[in-house]
Image: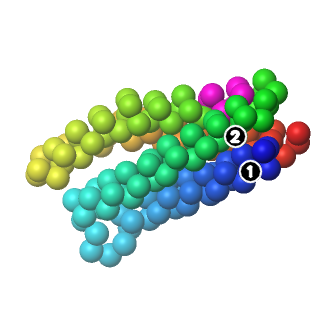
Amino acid sequence: MNEAAGAVTFVWLGMVLAISFLEAPLKFRAPGVTIQVGLGIGRLVFRALNLVESVLAAAVAVLVAVDGAPARVVVWTVALVVLLVGQLAVVRPRLNRRSDRVLAGEDLPRSRGHLVYIALEIAKVIALIGLGVTLLAR
């Protein structure tokens, strides 16, 4: 089971790296992409990513639970779930409310909420690497 959990973990890691650290910042540099268009695309992409992440988190949690994993695997798994829930339940709703205002035409200053989301993404990447390596080392 740890091989399956490891595979799911590294697929999840690849998705986060590709979308959060490659697609998201680059889309605003493309010619003709306005803030409104970029926000609209970003909301769709991150909604899809977060849905897939939720499925992958559930899969990892089930695989780890069924496998009777050691404490260090459980700790990494719990950390990942807590980080994801924090993003989805606390940060994303605030970012969505703010992007609603921007899409409605308000001129707002840069958001610190994005910095919090990025910090959580970095922590999630570290936890995904930690879990994946720990699963491979078993």
Q: Residue 48, how many percent across, how many down?
A: 41, 55
| Identity of the residue drawn at 84% across and 46% down | 136
Hey, what amino acid is under mark 2?
Answer: Leu
Q: Residues within 10 Å of mark 2 (few under 14, many from 20)?
A: some
Q: Tell me the element at label 1.
A: helix
Residue 114 sits in quarter: top left
| Identity of the residue drawn at 64% across and 37% down | 62
Q: Which residues are magenta?
A: 74-79
Q: Main secondary structure of the magenta part?
A: helix
Residue 137 sits in quarter: top right
Kindly give the residue lying farthest to the front in the view shown: 66
Q: Residue 92, how many percent across, how many down?
A: 36, 39
17 is higher (above) or lower (below) than 86: below
Q: On the rendered structure, is 70 left or right of 89?
A: right
Q: Tell me the element at label 2.
A: helix
**Label disc, if present, on residue 14 of the rendered structure:** none
Q: Residue 95, how many percent across, how many down?
A: 31, 40
Q: Which residue is mark 1?
A: 4
Q: CA distance from mark 2 to mark 1?
A: 7 Å
| Identity of the residue drawn at 44% across and 35% down | 87
Hey, what amino acid is under mark 1?
Answer: Ala
Q: Quadrant of the N terminus?
A: top right
| Identity of the residue drawn at 37% across and 29% down | 90
Q: Is residue 103 magenta?
A: no
Q: Which residue is mark 2?
A: 63
For this rendering, which residue is in front, 46 or 119? 46
For this rendering, which residue is in front, 40 or 102? 40
